[in-house]
Amino acid sequence: MKHDYNLVYSDFYTNYIQLAQQGELKKVLKKNSRKFLDLLDDIPKSKIDYSYGKDKWTIKQLLQHITDAERVFAYRALRVARYDQTPLPGFDENTWAEHADVSKRDWNDMVKEFRLLRRSNQLMIESFSSEQLAATGTASNHPISVAALCFILAGHVEHHMNIIRERYLIK
């Protein structure tokens, strides 16, 4: 069933939106969460610190990036859903990764952190009214709607699941 959401976003997010916008938002997020957590459970311990190339993140670093981005997109959604019109800045994912030392972090704790964060975000999103989902604000100098930010949560994870499967888990 096709749902009409007010999807306002910059071209930068088109891929994420296309990967995620395939139905009712709550169902999309639930399915996306299940698929990602299943994938994380299937990653062999020997691959967690694997990087497929020089200057490429390890899977552990990638999970940290996904968790960090999840927080940023959810925060943006909350701000816009509360009709806060303060322009929200972008963030430099590479700087964040450089300063997120995952070497001493436990993989299972990181997976648990994402699971709890995503569940919390799902509950927040479920609380948004239709009007809040349609609300727009500014992030990274571009207009964006709450609904788009919510689909970006799922699409960003889909994007990285594809990368994990194609570049990290090849036999």
Image (tube, helix red, strand yellow):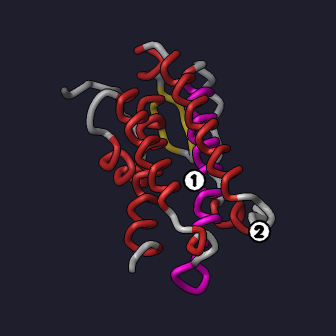
Q: Could you tell me which residue is drawn at 48 percent across and 18 percent down?
A: 132
Residue 160, image x, y percentages: 46, 59
| Viewer-closest of 39 and 18 | 39
- Identity, as a three-letter code, of the amino acid under mark 2: Ser
Looking at marks 2 and 1 on the same chain, the residue that comes earlier in the sequence is marked by 1
Which residue of the protein is positioned furthest toward the left in this rendering? Answer: 1
- Identity, as a three-letter code, of the amino acid under mark 1: Ile
Which residue of the protein is positioned furthest toward the bottom in this rendering? Answer: 54
Q: How crowded is mark 1: few (under 14 residues within 10 Å), some or many (20 or more)?
A: some
Majority SS type along the magenta span: helix
User: Which image quadrant: the N terminus?
Assistant: top left
| Viewer-closest of 79 and 57 | 57
Q: Is residue 82 visible?
A: yes
Residue 138, image x, y percentages: 55, 36
Q: Give the range drawn in magenta.
A: 51-80
Q: In this view, does 132 lie to the left or right of 18?
A: right
